Image (cartoon, rainbow, N blue to C red):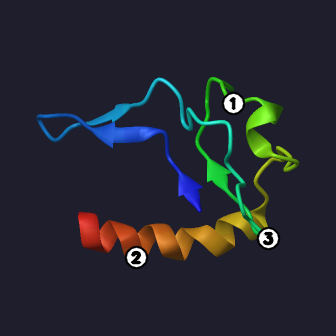
Amino acid sequence: MILNGVKFDDDGKLVPLPEPYPGSNMFSLASGGAIFVRDPHKTMVDEQLNGGKFTRMTDADWELILPLMERTKNFSG
């Protein structure tokens, strides 16, 4: 899952959300995997992760998600 912390406003412009994920139950019912979150202001806290952990993205992470992001870009422009 990729959480970008952005949305489109009424004029169709991309604007940041006040928080990338405002909930406290991010990994509810998850059995594994990763969530990539854009959080430049570090507003997320450990309590939102339900036992998960924050780590830095690696080159291998980028190799995994870049094709997905490019495919999404082709659909959304």
Q: Which residue is mark 3?
A: 31
Distance from Cα at disc 3 to Cα at disc 2: 26 Å
Residue at screen point 72% across, 63% down:
29
Query: In the rendered structure, which amino acid carries the disc numbered 3?
Result: Ser
Q: Which residue is mark 1?
A: 44
Residue 63 position in % (x across, y down): 67, 72
Q: Earlier in the sequence, mark 3 or mark 2?
A: 3
Name the quarter where the C terminus is drawn: bottom left
Which of discs 3 and 2 lies nearer the camera? The answer is 3
Distance from Cα at disc 1 to Cα at disc 2: 27 Å
Helix, strand or loop under label 2: helix
Distance from Cα at disc 1 to Cα at disc 3: 21 Å
Helix, strand or loop under label 3: loop
Residue at screen point 40% across, 31% down:
16
Q: Which residue is mark 2?
A: 71
Q: Earlier in the sequence, mark 1 or mark 3?
A: 3
Say which quarter of the image contains residue 60.
bottom right
The crowding category of the residue bearing disc 1, from other C-alpha atoms within 10 Å (few below 14, some 14 to 19, many at least 20), is some
Which of discs 1 and 3 lies nearer the camera? The answer is 3
Name the quarter where the N terminus is drawn: bottom right
The crowding category of the residue bearing disc 2, from other C-alpha atoms within 10 Å (few below 14, some 14 to 19, many at least 20), is few
Residue at screen point 50% across, 73% down:
68
Judging depth in this view, the residue of 23 and 7 nearest the camera is: 23
Residue 18 position in % (x across, y down): 47, 23
Query: In the rendered structure, which amino acid carries the disc numbered 2?
Result: Arg
Helix, strand or loop under label 1: loop
The crowding category of the residue bearing disc 3, from other C-alpha atoms within 10 Å (few below 14, some 14 to 19, many at least 20), is few
Judging depth in this view, the residue of 52 and 61 nearest the camera is: 52
